[in-house]
Image (cartoon, rainbow, N blue to C red):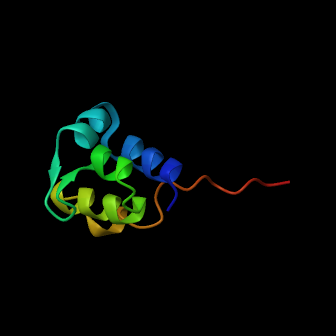
Protein backbone atom coordinates (compact mmCIF):
# COMPACT_ATOMS: atom_id res chain seq x y z
CA UNK A 1 0.00 0.00 0.00
CA UNK A 2 1.35 3.39 -0.97
CA UNK A 3 0.85 6.55 1.05
CA UNK A 4 -1.63 7.85 -1.54
CA UNK A 5 -3.61 4.59 -1.31
CA UNK A 6 -3.63 4.88 2.48
CA UNK A 7 -4.97 8.44 2.34
CA UNK A 8 -7.61 7.45 -0.23
CA UNK A 9 -8.67 4.48 1.93
CA UNK A 10 -8.99 6.70 5.02
CA UNK A 11 -11.09 9.22 3.10
CA UNK A 12 -13.34 6.49 1.68
CA UNK A 13 -13.82 4.75 5.03
CA UNK A 14 -14.13 7.72 7.38
CA UNK A 15 -15.32 10.58 5.17
CA UNK A 16 -15.59 13.84 7.13
CA UNK A 17 -13.91 12.21 10.14
CA UNK A 18 -10.77 11.22 8.18
CA UNK A 19 -8.63 14.10 9.45
CA UNK A 20 -9.58 13.49 13.07
CA UNK A 21 -8.99 9.75 12.71
CA UNK A 22 -5.46 10.24 11.42
CA UNK A 23 -4.45 13.13 13.67
CA UNK A 24 -6.24 12.47 16.97
CA UNK A 25 -6.75 8.72 17.37
CA UNK A 26 -3.89 6.96 19.17
CA UNK A 27 -3.12 3.62 17.56
CA UNK A 28 -1.83 1.18 20.16
CA UNK A 29 -0.42 -1.19 17.52
CA UNK A 30 2.01 1.48 16.27
CA UNK A 31 2.30 3.56 19.44
CA UNK A 32 1.24 6.89 17.89
CA UNK A 33 -1.35 8.51 15.65
CA UNK A 34 -1.62 7.51 11.99
CA UNK A 35 -0.28 10.91 10.95
CA UNK A 36 2.76 10.59 13.20
CA UNK A 37 3.32 7.00 12.07
CA UNK A 38 3.37 8.09 8.42
CA UNK A 39 5.88 10.81 9.25
CA UNK A 40 7.99 8.27 11.17
CA UNK A 41 8.20 6.05 8.08
CA UNK A 42 6.01 3.19 9.27
CA UNK A 43 4.59 1.35 6.25
CA UNK A 44 1.14 2.66 5.28
CA UNK A 45 -0.33 -0.88 5.17
CA UNK A 46 0.70 -1.44 8.81
CA UNK A 47 -0.85 1.89 9.80
CA UNK A 48 -4.04 1.15 7.86
CA UNK A 49 -4.49 -2.20 9.60
CA UNK A 50 -3.83 -0.60 13.01
CA UNK A 51 -6.35 2.14 12.25
CA UNK A 52 -8.93 -0.41 11.12
CA UNK A 53 -8.43 -2.47 14.28
CA UNK A 54 -8.73 0.58 16.53
CA UNK A 55 -11.85 1.86 14.73
CA UNK A 56 -13.52 -1.56 14.45
CA UNK A 57 -13.61 -1.49 10.65
CA UNK A 58 -15.03 -4.86 9.50
CA UNK A 59 -12.39 -7.19 8.01
CA UNK A 60 -14.08 -7.22 4.60
CA UNK A 61 -13.37 -3.48 4.26
CA UNK A 62 -9.72 -3.65 5.30
CA UNK A 63 -8.04 -5.25 2.30
CA UNK A 64 -7.55 -3.88 -1.18
CA UNK A 65 -9.01 -0.48 -0.36
CA UNK A 66 -7.50 2.74 -1.60
CA UNK A 67 -6.55 1.40 -4.99
CA UNK A 68 -7.65 3.23 -8.05
CA UNK A 69 -9.73 1.15 -10.43
CA UNK A 70 -7.70 0.17 -13.50
CA UNK A 71 -8.22 2.27 -16.59
CA UNK A 72 -10.01 0.66 -19.47
CA UNK A 73 -8.77 1.47 -22.93
Image spot of residue 16 (x, y percent): 31, 30
From this viewpoint, which residue is outermost toward the top? Answer: 16
Residue at screen point 49% across, 51% down? 3
Task: Please state which of residues 1 and 40 is positioned toward the viewer in this rendering.
Answer: 40
Residue 38, above or below 21? below
Query: Toward which corner of the image does residue 25 lie, by quadrant?
Result: top left
Image spot of residue 7 (x, y percent): 44, 45
Query: Toward which corner of the image does residue 60 lie, by quadrant?
Result: bottom left
Task: Please state which of residues 35 and 52 is positioned toward the viewer in this rendering.
Answer: 35
Residue 60, above or below 40? below
Q: Is residue 43 left or right of residue 31?
A: right
Image spot of residue 37 (x, y percent): 30, 52
Q: Is residue 70 left or right of residue 48?
A: right
Residue at screen point 20% across, 63% down? 53
Residue at screen point 24% across, 41% down? 21
Task: Please state which of residues 1 and 67 is positioned toward the viewer in this rendering.
Answer: 1
Task: Please state which of residues 25 and 66 is positioned toward the viewer in this rendering.
Answer: 25
Amino acid sequence: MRRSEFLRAVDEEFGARANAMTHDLFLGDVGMTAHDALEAGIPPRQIWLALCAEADVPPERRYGVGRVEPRRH
